[in-house]
Each structure stands twice: as structure tokens, then as C-alpha cells.
Image: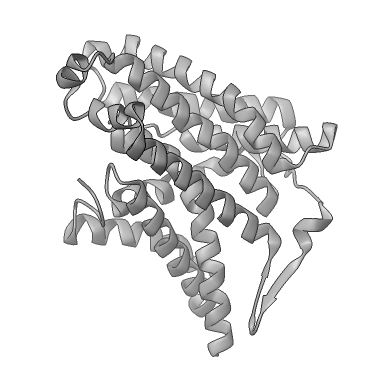
Amino acid sequence: MLDLLANATVAGLLLGGFYAAVTVGLSIAFGYLDIVNIAHPGFMMLGAFAAWFATDAWQLDPILAGTLFAPIFFVAGAALYRVYHVSFERRGDIGLRGLAFFFGVLFLAEVVLLLLFGADYRGLNLPYLETMITAGPVSVPLRMVLPFLVSLALFAALQWMFDHTFFGRAIKAVSQDPVALRLMAADPVRVKEVAFGIAIATASIAGALLITIAPVEPSMGRDYIGRIFAIVVLGGLGSLTGTLLAALALGVAESLTATLYGPSWSPAVAFGALLIALVVRPTGLLGR
């Protein structure tokens, strides 16, 4: 029994690392920019299929492909923010209509993938991903370890940028005091544009990590909407460290629930955690 719990806990930590990579872009958009980008999972699916295509057609490593595609996603994210700003934010209409806008982007991404790739599952069969790593009673596949390590590296790089660069601090300030930001010779709209581009660029890497873990199909992004919003709220708006801790905690909780009570119960964990966080600690673990 102890061996089973140990394996479930380690698997949950690795799963939580992947959840963190999926969530970090939304944490930037929602936590720092006050943009409820519900389309983020759609961009992750675009990244997953882009990585699959690059691996299948050009024999690139999927994680390398996701990193190489990140600048393209950055440009797409910056352009999308410009449309959002001109159409909604500048007019002060960022409520229901802004949310509907991102819903439309989510379904547009799904339709594009359906037209290009169909509804079939696409997966990768790379020998190194099947390698098992064993330490005592714990045994985990490399396909779960790599996303965990890449996610930690991604969080470390972003946290360093936010803490040690002028632009990173400008992103933190843009939703709190845009007037003061202008006095520091920084354009809040430009800061948001670049920050949103960075948020979407992370979706390319998250999608590449997803395709290394399991086969994907175009509508899978919907499964992550509730989960990633629960992680952002549980971690606390404006805290990347909180997002990482919440993702790890949720991954462990889901893994233990699936092991002890069956996988059908694990999706309820995310929403249960969200409800508890809203009641007990609305600001999240490390929220502002």
C-alpha cells in the first residue's frame, strides 16, 4: 500500500508540473493583465499539433519544436491582444463581450485543427519517451519527467524576468497603476501587448509537453479550462510561485484520488479545490 501511495504521489507531482506549464500563460494574462483568456487551452492544442507535425514531417524533437514555434505564438498573441484592446478594452467593454470574444477564439482554434487534422487522435511513438526511471519502489516514465523539468525551467526563467528586469516589473505594475507606469516612460498598452504575447508563447511549449505525454485531438483543450482556472485562483492572482504550488498540489490530489477512488473522481478535485479556495482563502495561497 505504501509503495502504491508513493508512486501515486510522485506521479501527481510530475502531473502537477505539467499542469503548471499549461497554466502559467493564463496566470500571466489573468493575474497580471486582468484578461480572462479562456482561449488559452485552444492555443495549447495548436502548439500540440504544431509539435506533432514538426516531429512527424521533419523528425524534430517535440519539445524543441514547441520552443522553436514559441516566437510565432508570441506574434499571434500580441496581434490578438491588439484586436482585443481596440475592440473591447479601449472602450471599457471587457466583461461579457470580452469573454465571448475569447470563447470565439477557442472554438475557432478547434475548428481550424479539425479542418487540418480531422477528429482522430494524434500521438508520438518516440523510443526515449518509453524509458522508465526507477528509484526504490517508485517507477515513473520519462515522458512524465521531461515535462516536469521543462516546466520548472520555464517558471524559473519567467520568475527571474519578473523579479530582475524593468519590463518584468512593468508587467506586474500594468494592472495596478498604469498612470504611474506612464510616468516611468512605459506604454501600458505596449507592455500588455508584449506580456500577452509571452503568455501565448508559453502555450506552444505546453502543447509540445502534452503531445509527449499522450495522444491529442482538437477538442481536448476544453478539458483543461476548469482545471487551469482553478489553479490560478488557488495559487493566487499575480503569483507565479503560487501557481506552481497550486498546480503541484492539484496534481497530487488528482493522482491520489484516481488511485484510491478511481479516475472518474479526479476531475471533481479541481472544482472542489476552487470552491474551497473561494470560501476559505479568496486571495489564494500567495495572491496579492
Query: Up-down: is 136 above or below 29?
Result: below
Judge whether residue 73 can be spotted in this image: yes
On the picture, is 77 further left or further right than 33? right
On the image, the x and y values in percent for residue 244 come to 41, 54
Residue occupying image coordinates x 73% and y 31%: 117
On the image, the x and y values in percent for residue 235 come to 31, 53
Which one is nearer the viewer's eye here, 273 or 155? 155
Query: Up-down: is 266 above or below 213?
Result: below
Residue occupying image coordinates x 48% and y 22%: 77
In the rendered image, which quarter contains the N terminus? bottom right
Query: Up-down: is 69 above or below 56?
Result: above
Judge whether residue 42 can be spotted in this image: no
On the picture, is 156 further left or further right than 181? right
Residue occupying image coordinates x 34% and y 47%: 232
Residue sticking out furthest to the front: 164
Rendering quarter of residue 274:
bottom left
In the rendered image, which quarter contains the C terminus? top left
On the image, the x and y values in percent for residue 247 come to 42, 56
Rendering quarter of residue 24:
top left
Residue occupying image coordinates x 48% and y 74%: 256
On the picture, is 57 further left or further right than 10? right
